[in-house]
Image (cartoon, rainbow, N blue to C red):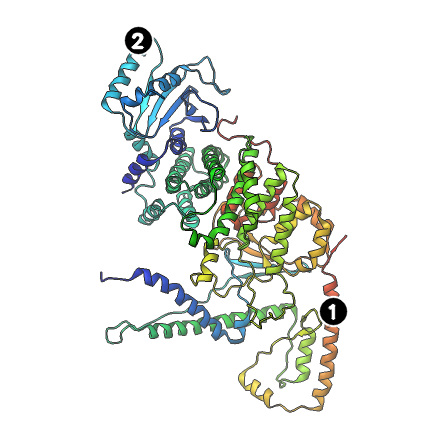
Amino acid sequence: MLPDFPDIKNQISPILMNYLNRRVRFHLGFFGEIPMVPIPEGSFTKLVRADGTCDDTPLEKAQGKISVDTTPNGGLSFEAVLKSIDDVAQQMALQEKQMLFRRINQVTEETGNVIDARNQPLSAKLLNDSLEMMHIEFSDDGKPHLPSLVVHPDVAQRLMEHKETEEDVIEKERQDQIIARKREEFFARESRRKLVG
Amino acid sequence: MLERVVENWLASVTEKAFELPLSQLLSLDGYTIIHIARPHGPMEQGKDILALTAEGNPCAFQVKARDLTLKDWRDPDQPLKGQIEDLLDVPIQHPAFDHKRRHESTLVTTGVLDDTLRQTLHAFNEGRRRSGKPTVNVLVKGQIESKIRAALGRFLPGKLTDTRDFLQLWLADGTSLPSRREISTLFEERISGLRAKSNLKEIQAVCGEIVILGSYLAHPFQLKENHISEIQVWTLVASTMFKVAALSRKAQRVAIESLGLVEYGITEAMQRLVTECETRRDYIEGNPWTDAYVYRARATLVAGYLGAVVLWQKWLGEPLTALPVFQRFWSDNQSQMWLWGEAAVLSFLAVGWAFDRTSAARESEKLVAQLVGAILDENGKSRRARPSRDGEEIPARRGLADPYVSVDEILREPIGQGNSRIGATYLGQSYTLESLVKILVHRRFRQLLQTVWYRITYVAFQTYRPTKPSDLWRWANGRKGGIEAKHTPTPTSWQTLLNEVETLDPQLSPPLASEYPHFLLAFLLVAPHRLNPTTCLTLEQSTWDGGQWIVGRKK
């Protein structure tokens, strides 16, 4: 064989893995902010909620293919390797996003937390309808942790350009009422976090 | 190449370290080991190992780990001749032996006898034979090598990867902690062919092989007198035996016999650890300049092991020689204890249990309460962040690493060498909090729990659930089993908690763990990710009294 540089390569390998990981998080976009919890052993996770309901989640695999030009003419450049890692990161992020959406759809359908807009455009009413069905957390001083809205870029553009209507004003009031009610529910939940009996 | 390893090992192994694998070799030859003399135990009149042959004849063995010459025979201080006469003529003092029956005597050495000694021994035996007295048998290096080769018969021509892995472990420099994952994988590979229906001979061969391989893997640490690492290697041998024992009643009988030898090996290493800590003026290793970075990790590890030695001695009914050493170490080093991750929880618990069972000090409750507080601070709901005085950005919290993360990995991170936990967070979860809660419930510390219960409800209790309980004796189960994340009910009933500590979950209990709590504690110190509410309560509820040495125990 030709001389190799195993020691330095052993050190670079984890750095490249780290880079791959960061790029996946980057390509996940909004979903990249979701905390990543290691599953060190086993092939499934089971969530037992405070109300005793359970949720079994099998582990799924996200994978990508790395290809780099190894011909003498093309040369093997580090930039090319980084580029191919980024390509893999994109593939993996896409798979992870699909998995997340699949899972969200499955869970919301199971729990009935789905609103069918029946081809109506996205509106404040629709958003409030969905807010009604959601579990919302609050900070200790009562500030709501409102959910993020994931929409197609075209819809996002339309929302940015949207001008306030009379219906929006009514829905704003409704939203305040929903949040006030959910705040009460939250504090009621909080007061149950104790040892009794 | 492995034959050279056998030879090198025999050339450097000490007498005491050789007794254990020799006992295993004798066991493979059909002997039942009844007693192994300990250096700190009473004198055995030249007898290091006592055993019964398959026919029930008593035997005594004296072990030497060097070449023997006529000079040894005539040594003015400890003549070998006198030792052999004691071996032959002083009756065996042991309740398992029939005093009226004459015992067979064997001198075993890992070296050779020089020609003059060989002739002298021949003449010595001839003389005794003529006077109707018993004679001594001799077992030397070449015969032992053959026995080892036979015992490792399945391993020697094994897969190249096994051989390479084995050699890497055998060539460890002996100063660090052992490569636990690699050692467990090697053992796991060796027992993977055993089934519930495997016959006695197969099971005996595998158990023998594991103990002999364990002797080899413990050797680098024995040479460096790195006792904690040696204990860890033996503990991994023990956990493999427990895994075998779970296969069938037959397998259990064989595995427990080998486990008895491992119990002896661990006890010896523990005693040496105590002796070392007793005589040391400080606990620094190597270059003090760099040792400052790792000192707290070592102090935490040593405190946990000294606590475990106290409990181990108590369980076996031995004098508590470790207690004053443990107490002194704690008084000098408790400020150095470091909860570097959830894997360190076990060291704190071992200290607490050792105090509990030997004094009225309430050290244990204090420690458990501190652990609960620390986990809630690190992994629980964040308190409102206050900007620091100098306006520095507050670093994002990640929580205490789960117990699968080793201290090595934690130490590497601040110097840019840690890569295994990239992007991971442990907030909102804990693998050890439920166990700690169960200890407090078991001790009826309701008021204390009441003050922190709100914060506890924000942390999910994580538990690894194996496919089979015996998998809990394994270091790693790959994709077998799964992780359960459980949120406490709101509100939580105190009565339900009380009921839970009274009924242990059998799925989370490694088989035989409650019968051998000392092994369970040693295993959890090596494999802290096996701490779960059931293993924790098994140790919490143990009185650490009434244990018996496995070797020599009535069956």
Read off the residue under disc 2: B130
Q: Given the image, what chain letter belongs to the residue carrying mark 2?
A: B
**Residue at screen point 30% across, 40% down:** B5
| CA gap, disc 1 and disc 2 | 99 Å
Left or right for B153, reference B317: left
Image x and y of residue B506, in percent = 60, 45
Whether residue B482 appears in this view of the structure is yes
Q: Residue furthest top?
A: B131
- Location of residue B555 in the rendering, given as x and y in whole percent from the top left corner: 52, 27
Residue A139 position, x and y percent, is: 68, 70
Q: Quadrant of residue B230?
A: top left
Percent across and percent down for residue B44 are 44, 22
Name the quarter where the N terminus of chain A is drawn: bottom left
Kind of residue sitting beneath label 1: Glu
Q: Chain of mark 1?
A: A
Residue B515: name its quadrant.
top right
Tag of residue B52? none
Name above or below for residue A26 compared with residue B89.
Answer: below
* Circle 2: element type: helix
Secondary element type, mark 1: helix
Pointer 1 residue:
A185
Residue A88 is left or right of residue A38, and the answer is: left
**Amino acid identity at mark 2:** Arg
- Graded by Cα atoms within 10 Å as few (under 14), some (14 to 19) or many (20 or more), the crowding at tag 2 reads few
